Image: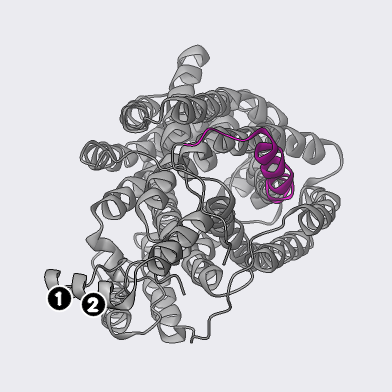
Amino acid sequence: MSSSAPASPDAPADPKQHRRVLEALSGLLLGMFVSMLASTVVSTSLPTIIHDLDGDQTAFTWVVTATLLTTAISTPIWGKLADLGNRKLLFQLAIVIFIVATAAAGFSTNPEMLIAFRAVQGIGAGGLAALSQVIMADIISPRERGRYMGLFGAVMAVATIGGPLLGGVIADGWGWRWNFFVALPVAILALVIVQSTLHLPKREPKKTSIDYLGIVLLSVAVSLLLIWVSLAGDQFEWWSWTTVWMVGGALVATAVFIAVELRSKEPLIPLTMFRNLTFTLSVVASIATGIAMFGASVFLSQYMQLARGATPTEAGLMTIPMIGGLLVASIGVGALVTRFGKWKPYLIVGAVLLTAGSYLLSTIHYDTDFTLVSIYMAMLGAGVGMTMQNLVLVVQNTTAPSQIGVASSGVTFFRSLGGTIGVSVMGAALAARVTDLVTERKDDIAAALASLGAEAPKWVEQLQSGSLPKVSTMPEALRVVFEDIYANGISHSFLIAVPFAVISLIAIVFLPNKPLTRMTTTERIQASEADLATVSVPEGMEALTATGSISTVGDGRPAGDAR
């Protein structure tokens, strides 16, 4: 225990401390950059990848969903491990898992192989998402965190802008497989920098058990639900015995998971945290943020290529307005939060923009003025930038130091879960809508094929294969029809995100507006220990006798017990 008293909550920022924080964050930022780059560099070329691997719309959705699913499931596990073990080592392990799986995905020969490696990739991504938030809480106070979250927003924007552009150039020039290999040199550099610059406060090791049964039950519940959403209406009817056993199995697994968590000494997700109104409402709001963030990144790329005939490189350029909105909002709001200590107004504005952007994107067609599409994308991006990191911030601000890991990963988990379910539902809705529209417009398609003459049989065979079409290579007559079909289907899928965005706005409005502290997690632990050290046993007993109760920190232990 440090002999010096922790810094005052209202103490001004120390320039030397600021420099040390930047040095420590350099490896953390690079690790986050490489994980995002490895994901975004594939986004614009994914329609081409699925086409080359003879995959259909369901395969396209599952290539994305597999990563989101394992990210969601592994996030609370990483968060729990962060409360128990060496956070720096765990972060490095997450980078290694992510990059090895990403490189292996480059050798895929069919959609199933690609989906499998993307699932392993998600395990590493879950660790990077959860641990970066926990480590930030170790070294930066909530009040000061806004300025540094701006850096995370900048890294996110650079990776999200540069990734699709780089991916498009690589796919068009060298082939899409190199998209999976490009991040390897950066990953090695990230590991070296993390090792040399990230020095975390030493923590007493904790002897405990891992909630393996909870992990299995959570995995079963989430997996059954997502598989059902993805395949219902295609492989089997929505109302069928398959639906009954899959949905029923998910509900039973969820009920047993809750029972196990309530009885476990070290639960994977401590359900007592839901007694904290800030945590509960932030979780609800995070679900909508996840749907908007992941849904937009997946389906806007499809819109640009399937509804506007863009190449992968062009699609990357065309999504810049959304990333620009995210970048400006994330950095700007982060600076304002640090300067003025106010966070709630920005979250409310962000939720409004999220709702408006989702609705407006549900109105787009293949020939919608691209200026309008850009404005809609910028609004959605700004909404995500203003809400995503700040929801984690307000939870960390009100959570006991001993539960920072599970609380941070809990919000991230539900955001990933929302994104996973959202992408699955939007993908299923898109596939069903496209199928219906192809049937409705079979006369237009037949007329377009008839105008192709000798080339018609080739395109008939390609359309009948069931694989995702490469719209940009189609003849003009056929391309216009399919651009309209896919634009209609994609805009219809965005409508699904609107009610969730409205719920997010309501949850944010009712968030308790608590001021941000200037104390880091480490300083809060020291402060608690110092408070206990200054109270004698007789005084403590007298206080307990007078109140008749013991103040707890939310997990059943006395306040200040940071074991």
**Magenta span contains residue 29:** yes
Q: Amino acid at mark 2?
A: Met
Please state the horizontal and vertical placement of residue 441, each as a whole percent of the image.
40, 35
- Residue at 47 percent across and 25 percent down: it is 339
Please state the extent of the stretch shown in magenta in the rendering.
Answer: 11-31
Using the image as rendered, state which of residue 90 and residue 494 is in the foreground.
90
Mark 2 and mark 1: Cα distance apart in space: 6 Å
Can residue 554 be seen here? The reply is yes
Q: Residue at x 67, y 43 (%)?
A: 21
Q: Mark 2 highlights which residue?
A: 541
Q: Is residue 6 left or right of residue 38?
A: left
Residue 197 to residue 358: above or below: below
Query: Residue at left 66%, top 62%?
Result: 91
- Which residue is at a point 36% across and 73% down the rendered structure image? 221
Contact between marks 2 and 1 (CB within 8 A): the answer is yes
The one of 298 and 241 positioned closer to us in this rendering: 298
Q: Secondary structure at mark 2?
A: helix
Magenta stretch holds residue 43: no
- Residue 291's place in the image compared with 348, above or below, is below
Q: Nearer the viewer, residue 495 or 166?
A: 166
Identify residue type, mark 1. Answer: Thr
Residue 547 horizontal/vertical position (percent)? 13, 69
Q: Main secondary structure of the magenta part?
A: helix
Which residue was labeled with disc 1? 545
Q: Quadrant of the N terminus?
A: bottom right
Tell me the crowding category of disc 2: few under 14, some 14 to 19, or many 20 or more residues within 10 angstroms, Cα based: few
In the image, residue 550 above or below residue 373 = below
Q: Taking 152 as reference, is 494 left or right?
A: left
